[in-house]
Structures are given as C-alpha cells and as structure tokens.
Amino acid sequence: MNQPDPPGRIAPHIPADVYHRAQATGQPVVIVTNDTTANGFSWQRLLYPFAIAGAAVLGGWGLVAALCYLLDFAAHTATVIAGAAGPIGVGGITLKLARTKNH
C-alpha cells in the first residue's frame, strides 16, 4: 500500500491511515485544537508602561530631592561666606551681606 502523503501539513496526532480512509470514503476530517488565548484583558500588556511610568516618577522625585539638597547646601554656603566676609563696598556704597547677632 504505497499511498502519497497528504498535501500540506496536518496535525501530528492524526494518523495517515485515518486521513487516507477519510479521503477514500469522502468523510470529512475534523481537527480540534485548543485555543490558548484568553478571552479577558491581558494585564501583562500594562506591565511595561506602568513600570516605565513608575521609574520616571521615581526618577523625577529623586531629581527634585537632589535639587532641594543642593539649593540648601548653596544657601548655607552663601550664608557662611557672607558672615565671614563682612560688609562689601564698591565705589563708596557698602552692602552688608549678613546681619550680626548683636543687631
């Protein structure tokens, strides 16, 4: 019994003799496959956008905190320099940068 293979690809669980018998008798071959796609909403589609948005928000807050720290450090540095320098005068105009504690 040297019959040619069926045309195209068939599912590996259907034996060739079943296919050939169906071809000889004219019966249709029914192939049942399981659908693996879910009908509901896939939450994994939102995972990457929320992860990226969360990282951007955390990075933004980190930048704000670093900027506040640097401005605080600059203000303290300016206060220390102004207190140590005393009054600055240019062309007869004197500018006192910091108040003394004796006021």
Image (tube, rainbow, N blue to C red):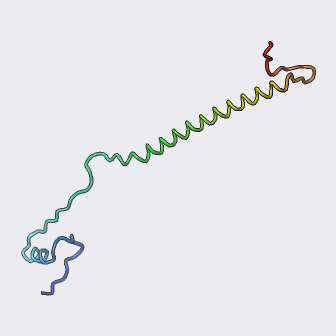
Instruction: Find residue 17 and report its horizontal and vertical position in percent.
Output: 12, 78
- Vertical relation: 81 (above or below) 56: above
- Vertical relation: 89 (above or below) 8: above
- Name the image quarter holding the C terminus: top right
Query: In the picture provided, is 42 more to the left or to the right than 5?
Result: right
Residue at the spot x=23%, y=57% of the render? 35
Among all residues in the image, which is located at the extreme bottom?
Answer: 2
Specify the quadrant of the image occupied by residue 41. top left
- Name the image quarter holding the N terminus: bottom left
Among all residues in the image, which is located at the extreme top?
Answer: 103
Of 31 and 62, which appears nearest the observer? 62
Residue at the spot x=21%, y=72% of the render? 12
Specify the quadrant of the image occupied by residue 13. bottom left
Residue at the spot x=27%, y=54% of the render? 37
- Vertical relation: 77 (above or below) 51: above
Among all residues in the image, which is located at the extreme front?
Answer: 102
Of 85 and 21, which appears nearest the observer? 85
